[in-house]
Image (cartoon, grey):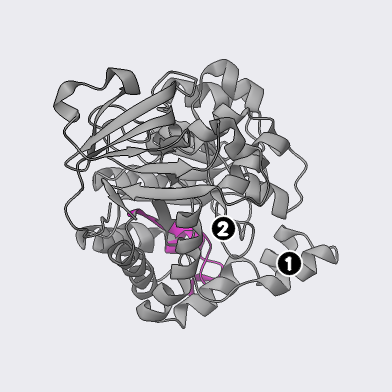
Amino acid sequence: MAKPSTPPAEDRVLAHGVVATMAEAGGYGLVTDGAIALEAGRVAWVGPSRDLPGRYRSLPAEDLAGCVVTPALIDCHTHLVFGGNRADEFEQRLAGASYEEIARAGGGIRSTVTRTRETSVDDLVAAALPRLDALLADGVGTVEIKSGYGLDLETERRMLLAARRLATLRPVGVVTTYLGAHALPPEFAGRPDDYIAHVCAEVLPTLAGEGLVDAVDGFCETIGFSPAQIERVFEAATRLGLPVKLHAEQLSNQGGARLACRFRALSADHLEFLDQAGVDAMAAAGTVAVLLPGAFYFLRDTTLPPVEALRAAGVPIAVATDCNPGSSPLLSPLLAMQFACTLFRLTPVEALRGMTVNAARALGLAGPAGCLEPGAPADLAVWDLRHPNELAYWIGQRPLKRRIWRGRDG
């Protein structure tokens, strides 16, 4: 994961806040008049303000006056770096064209590939920064950024370099995911197996060798790649010691989630057409279900992911924006949480866990990431709210009061 260079952390105590630690299984882990001691960029102690240990009483203290404190949000599935946009395709869909029809006619992912191949690293960074700033303004402390709009070595490298550079320009953690198996590039038209061989033998090993890849993803779908082709990509990732995840069961049931679980995937994402066999496989593998309600909303989908079956099987559920130019131009994690509740019937606590502790698990983040307990990174969001359930309640409000990254205001 790319990390920003920041000044030394400020040791201090934040007191008299409504602290949602997210460390309680299935709940908020609420401390209603809570305090948090921060030392050396990590959480040193959490508990009732009245119980603050004496060794922390000499630290500078700040009165939060009842504001809500949560872990900084984690957006665990984005395509934040790309060239151009696809507003014209939005108009086409409103006129009756489907996402699949547009893709098969040369639009969709391939149209963004054309524009991204024409864009320099500097321009990719400049275009992505406002999108990243919008996420930060909603309390995000860590963001995953996928490649997959280059589909050749040079452009995929530029995308990953741009993603890594973002972490040097803002106080945020960036996880980079290689998504070469996103679509078939024009130079490999009619030769998907040859393209997958190229990805496995040349592009992925090169980018991994350059230290640009934290995980490997794919798009397993009728307009993407078959399970057999994705399996070859996952085998190559495994040889390189890289974890995998998968866009699975978004438009049809291809058995992608079950395939991903055979490789102990960190996550399977979308999942609208996931069946019970896929749910059971995810539960057995410990694979996180990442729900992407922005894409569901924007594409006007009607098939709901099997949330009740995921709950019953104990599959961890994460939520993300899926920010991308074609199917989810969503720049508000809080709205993604709201959509997850209203469209998918998640509870507010499930939605917040989906953007904190479960999102951390979906990215394979080490240690007690995504929660507020001793040893966790001091990545916090302070909200001008009185209960964390309001985060998924308001539509269009910007309640973030302050964001703390590794112990410093950012």
Q: Residue at x 50, y 48 (%)?
A: 400
For label 2, the residue is 331
Q: Position of residue 320 (x, y in %)?
A: 53, 45
Upstream in sequence: badge 2 or badge 1: 1
Q: Position of residue 278 (x, y in %)?
A: 56, 28
* Image quarter hosting the C terminus: bottom left
Q: Is residue 96 left or right of residue 143?
A: right
Could you say which quadrant of the image residue 56 lies in?
top left
User: Mark 2 or 1, which is nearer the eye?
Assistant: 2
Q: Which mark is residue 90?
A: 1
How crowded pointer 1 is (Cα within 10 Å; few <14, some 14-19, many 20+) is rated as some
Position above or below: 257 against 237: above
Q: Position of residue 244 (x, y in %)?
A: 38, 43
Q: Which residues are magenta?
A: 173-195
| 186 vs 309, nearest the viewer | 309
Position above or below: 379 against 182: above
Callouts 2 and 1 close, C-beta under 8 Å? no
User: Does residue 186 show up magenta in the picture?
Assistant: yes
Q: Secondary structure at mark 2?
A: loop
| 168 vs 191, nearest the viewer | 168
| 207 vs 222, nearest the viewer | 207
